[in-house]
Amino acid sequence: MIFGKLLKLKVSFIAGLLCVFSASWVFSEPSKTSSISTPDGPIEVTVESAILIALENNQSLKVERLEPQIHKTFEDQEQATFDPVLSGVASFSREREQKRQTDSSTSYENEGTSTEADIGVSQFLSTGTDIAVDLSTNNTWSDLYSDQSASRIGLSVTQALLRGKGTDVNLASLRQARLDTQASQYELRGFVEAMVSQVEETYWDYALSQRKIQIFQESLKVAEHQLRETEELIRVGKLPETEITSAQAEIALQQQDLINARSTMLKIRLYLLRLLNPPGSNLWQREILLKNPPIVPEVTMDSVESHVEVALRLRPDLNEARLRVERGDLEVVKTKNGLLPKLDLFLTLGKSGYADSFGSSISDITGDYYNFSVGINVQYPFRNRDARARHKRSLLSQDQATEAVNNLANLVEMDVRTAYIEVNRAKDQISATIATLKLQEEKLRIETEKFRVGRSTMFLVAQAQRDLLISQISEVQAIVNYLKAIVELHRLEGSLLERRGIIAPGREPGSVSSEK
């Protein structure tokens, strides 16, 4: 199977490291190819080193690599719900007041002070339990009373019995945040696969544009030679002067094609520089020297069913869609729990100590003074329409997500099968263009010989030369199309990074831990 082959894939040219929070983008083995000769000089690249340069320097990738890290912060935010909370308060008050006795008109003044302190630790558990432990003390003094100190240590527990009960609902948001992080990894993986395919395809487009220029230049030399030969034949009287027009027209056409080819090459060069974004100054003025010519690779195609199998397992967008379904399952759990009435059991226990000093009141906590309370808190809105609407929406959204996965899987299979057909077509086209090229070369040779003995015209020779030119370009174009078709097939099946030896996050569908 293709997937088994991918697991054993070794690529000797790749090296580097791109960190993405807890996971990494790495290459399997050190590079043996030179990528950049000097910081500001020409860039000598193979296909492999071009990929490496892009992975290290592409600006768009630098932007996309931050997304998983951003999503990771939402995990930490949801995890904070279960963190212990330390709280405390301290206060001092002073009061001076006038009081009147109830059995006489005599009044008196009273001045007093009070200090209070309270410290506690609380935590919400994933079972739906709120636990709090606190220690408090109160010290009062006045003109009428002696110093009084009261200290208390208490424990309070609130347990959800219906709404908010259990780890399934209380960990749902955290698990959703983890799924969102994993989904962002699939998004990043898909972006990198698209970028790598763009680098490879642009590399071959640039090679094709250079080869076209060479073909046009060679053809132009032939046309100029034919013009000189025609002029000589006219001079000796073997051809009429009208024949020179066809030769001159052919040169003009060749020059026109050469101008267009050079313009196309310069545009592709700019796009390739944008993808690579190599270090150094004068980015747009740097030349790119390709070290890999477009040649037909030795590729043995597996069955289309094998490629489909790989795609259904590795396609990042499909894996991301599956995570969205899992996320929807968690949303259903949350909204279903929201349909229940709020029913909480609360329990409060406390021991108190009283004395004329703080230290003595703490020691007295072990005495006979205590407080205890237990009860139930009930809350349920009439009709509960908000919760019902949320739950219905989550169910509909989940059905929609499930259907979207099925639809996407169908589209993925169609993409792979279509790309597979294109690979085979492109491969067969190479053989056809080679055969056509040989015939056009022979056709031009025959037509040239006939022209030299006066049995043909310059127009027919120019037409044969033009047909040969088209065949030469078609041959190189067929090879490049075949190379690009293979890259596109591997991208559409989600195996491009694996085949290039790049180990990246998002390779397997992730699972969310059930633990807090």
Image (tube, rainbow, N blue to C red):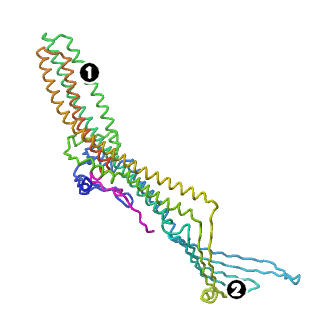
Name the residue beneath numbered marker 2.
Answer: 147
Q: Is residue 307 above or below residue 228?
A: below
Residue occupying image coordinates x 31% and y 33%: 264
For this rendering, which residue is in front, 450 or 61?
A: 450
- For label 2, the SS is loop
Image position, residue 455 (x, y; %): 13, 14
Question: Split into 4 quadrants, where in the image is the C terminus?
Answer: bottom left
Image: 406 above or below 470 = below
Q: Is residue 10 left or right of residue 270?
A: left
Q: Position of residue 90 (x, y in %)?
A: 63, 75
- Residue range (magenta): 497-516
Kind of residue at disc 2: Asp
Badge 1 element? helix
Instruction: Please state, as top left, top right, bottom left or bottom right, where the N terminus lies in the image.
Output: bottom left
Kindly identify the residue that appears in the image at 38 percent across and 60 percent down.
Answer: 510
Q: In the rendered view, does 382 fall on the left or right side of 420? A: right
Is residue 230 magenta-colored? no
Crowding around mark 1 (Cα neighbors within 10 Å: few <14, some 14 to 19, many 20+) is some
Q: Amino acid at mark 1?
A: Ala
Residue 287 in the image, given as x and y percentages of width and height: 29, 40
Give the residue at mark 1.
252
**Secondary structure character of the magenta stretch overall:** loop
User: What is the x, y in percent for residue 241?
Assistant: 19, 11
